[in-house]
Image (cartoon, rainbow, N blue to C red):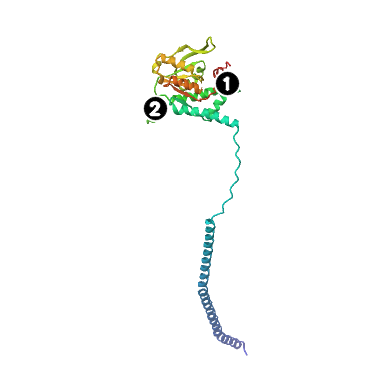
Amino acid sequence: MKEPDLIMNMKETNVALKEETTPTTMKSKKMAVESSSTVGSSTTAAASSMEAQTSPKSKKKSSSNLNNNNKSALQSLESVKAESTSPSPPSPPLPLMPQTPPSAATTTTNTTTTTSSTSFIDFNLTNDRISVLKCNNQIKELHTLLRDKETSHSDFKFYSDRLIRLLVEASLNQLPYSKQIVITPANCEYNGIKYFKGVCGVSIMRSGEAMEKGLRECCRSIRIGKILVQSVEDDHGRKKSSVIYAKFPSDIVTRKILLMYPIMTSGSTVNLAINVLKEHNVAESNILVLCLFSTPAGIQSVNSQYPDVHILTSEIHPSVPTDFGQRYFGTE
């Protein structure tokens, strides 16, 4: 055969083969797609049916578990309440310890402190003319240092000035005052007070001069008078006090008097000074006695003889430092 005839035969055979194979392949592809869709639909249906079958059961199980847990918790709470409300058995009584009676020394110290505090309270409660500084740790320490024999001269003077300053400031609170309105730098009104003028200090020489510094530090340019009282023994050996010197401002009658004397033991010296002031026509109600240390006997003596005189002290105690003047001025 010739070559053109062979080529034509080959093309015809190829076309025939294509026509035979294409319908079979298409059919197989359609069969595969249909099978896959049927498998997917069957799986989804099976899954949905499984969910429909299993979901109510699981919900029922979970709810039943919660109910069981709640029941068990309530039962445990009820048991705890029952245990707490049930009465506990009484505890056995503790054995009593034997009490030892206080010693004689303790009893004596307690009685002495009670008597001194009782006298202190009686003075404060029964007479409004007698005032005592409120005892705190600061004042108690100053009393201790001024009684200590080991305190040096410089320290004794320093602590004495501190106590005198506290006493003088407390005495200023008992002076009369009037209301006063002032204008501040911001042009605002302030309702304040103002002390009446006419305050005068009088010191009983020599120990009373130790209190002049504290008074001048609190009241500038204050006028201070002097009274010198001297004690002389008579023929029978008894001490007799008399006024040797007295110098006052000319207008002392119209002034409030701060009579300064640090130690008051028997009260005789203070009584003589008050008597001299009364001779200069000073009213008892205008006299305020300032004492650092006072005994109950001295307070009673002054108050009984001059009941209208005010007395201010830092302590009322049977034992007072009688060497105050010598230690303050360094002449001991």
Q: In this view, does 312 lie to the left or right of 94?
A: left
143 or 107: nearer the viewer: 107
In the image, residue 35 above or below residue 85: below
Which quadrant holds residue 199?
top left
Q: In this view, does 290 lie to the left or right of 108?
A: left
Q: Dot 2: what SS? A: strand
Q: Which mark is residue 154?
A: 1
Mark 2 and mark 1 residues within 8 Å of each other at the beta carbon = no
Tally of marks? 2
- Locate the N terminus by quadrant: bottom right
Which amino acid, by three-letter code, is at mark 2?
A: Ile
Where is residue 165 shown, x and y percent of the image? 49, 24
Where is residue 193 shown, x and y percent of the image? 39, 27
- Locate the C terminus by quadrant: top right
Which quadrant holds residue 306?
top left
Q: Which mark is residue 5?
A: none
**What residue occupies the far right of the structure in this picture?**
1
Q: Dot 1: what SS? A: helix
Q: Mark 2 points at which residue?
A: 193
Observer able to see residue 152: yes
Q: In this view, does 113 lie to the left or right of 307?
A: right
Mark 2 to mark 1 CA distance (whole Å)? 38 Å
Which amino acid, by three-letter code, is at mark 1?
A: Ser
**What residue occupies the far top of the structure in this picture?**
235
328 or 286: nearer the viewer: 286
Mark sitting earlier along the chain (2/1): 1
In the image, residue 175 above or below residue 242: below
Query: Which residue sits at x=44%, y=27%?
Result: 126
**What residue occupies the far bottom of the structure in this picture?**
1
Where is residue 161 shown, x and y percent of the image? 52, 22
Observer able to see residue 217: no
In the image, residue 36 above or below residue 137: below
